[in-house]
Amino acid sequence: MKYPVLFFFVSLLSCCAKSPGLEPESLVFEFEIPVKVTVNGYTGDMMEPFISRDGRYLFFNNLNDPAVNTNIFYAARINDTLFDFRGEVQGVNSRVLDGVPTMDRDSNFYFVSVANYIPTLASIYKGQFSNGVVINSSIVNGISRQEQGRVNFDVELSEDGNHLYFADGKFSASWQLESADLVIAEKTTTGFRRMTASGEILKNINTEELEYAACISPDELCFYFTRMPSVTAGILPRLWYATRTDKTKPFNKPRMITGLDGFIEAATVSGDSLVYFHKKDNQLFGLYCMRKKSAAAVLNYRN
């Protein structure tokens, strides 16, 4: 055969090219060893962290437990791992669960509350944050599926405020979580609506396991989330991430963040390089911060 070597390489490139229906792997990120976050003046549980888009504030809630009055708090930044406690966020807390704070660059503040779930079947609220106070708090229209037992128990607002990433949970009659998938909604003139392309964009994220606690990078090209087999399987939750090159495209096949141990959930990002999350230390949940070091393209594809 004439030019056998050339023919071999042409054939090899053809075989290695992306085939229809095969999804590329996410970029591979390396992270530094996590460092514990200290909040001066606060000694309780810290869960569901969120760093404001300007980096000035840390928001979090205390323990997610029906036996506890779960409320939203905030602290002012001193450095990446040290904050000064400022107290409860006013205008959002009730006598039941209020948590999972998030905000866009224009201080539009969103959070989860079950204070009025029974009459409304809705659990995501919005308001305007300024100096520790949220005003004009109201239910976000267009999110709830209006089905008893369906609860949106997490929420993440994109930096520009145009997209909501949230968990769609299904609970049993005894309020045991049975399933959880992530959903994207887009802003409308009256609230938000679930994107028709949400399932396609998150097709590599959602599985038969539980996916929740969404976190999106400022450019919406890197997506962090928590995955756990089930609440009764005895397997601890882990942080995962997925990337894409265009925010209208599906996220690539996700990767689990390795090197972390213990009960870990709920990533949030500050800028492009800092990732915060909560972890159970003995009897209390605390916050940790790790820096993303590098990324390298992965050229292999799913078989």
Image (cartoon, rainbow, N blue to C red):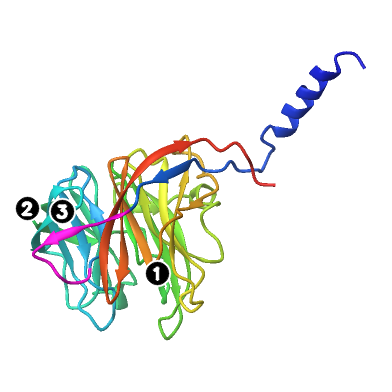
**Amino acid type, label 2:** Asn
Q: Residue at x 21, y 54 (%)?
A: 109
Q: Mark 2 vs mark 1: give the one in front.
A: 2
Q: Which quadrant of the figure contains the N terminus? A: top right
Q: Which residue is mark 3?
A: 82
User: Magenta stretch?
Assistant: 34-45
Comparing labels 2 and 3, the label whose residue is closer to the camera: 3
At label 3, counting other C-alpha atoms closer than 10 Å, the crowd grade (few under 14, some 14-19, many 20 or more) is some
Which amino acid, mark 1? Answer: Gln
Residue at which label 2 appears = 131
Q: Earlier in the sequence, mark 2 or mark 3?
A: 3
- Circle 2 Cα neighbour tier, 10 Å, few/some/many (<14 / 14–19 / ≥20): few
Residue located farthest toward the front when viewing the structure as drawn: 33
Is 40 contained in the magenta span?
yes
* Residue that label 1 marks: 146
Q: Say which label, 2 or 1, has the lower sequence index.
A: 2
Residue 7 drawn above or below residue 221: above
Q: Residues within 10 Å of mark 1 (few under 14, many from 20)?
A: few
- Considering the numbered disc 2 on the image, is that residue within a helix, a strand or a loop? loop
Lower sequence index among marks 3 and 1? 3
Residue sitting farthest toward the right: 1
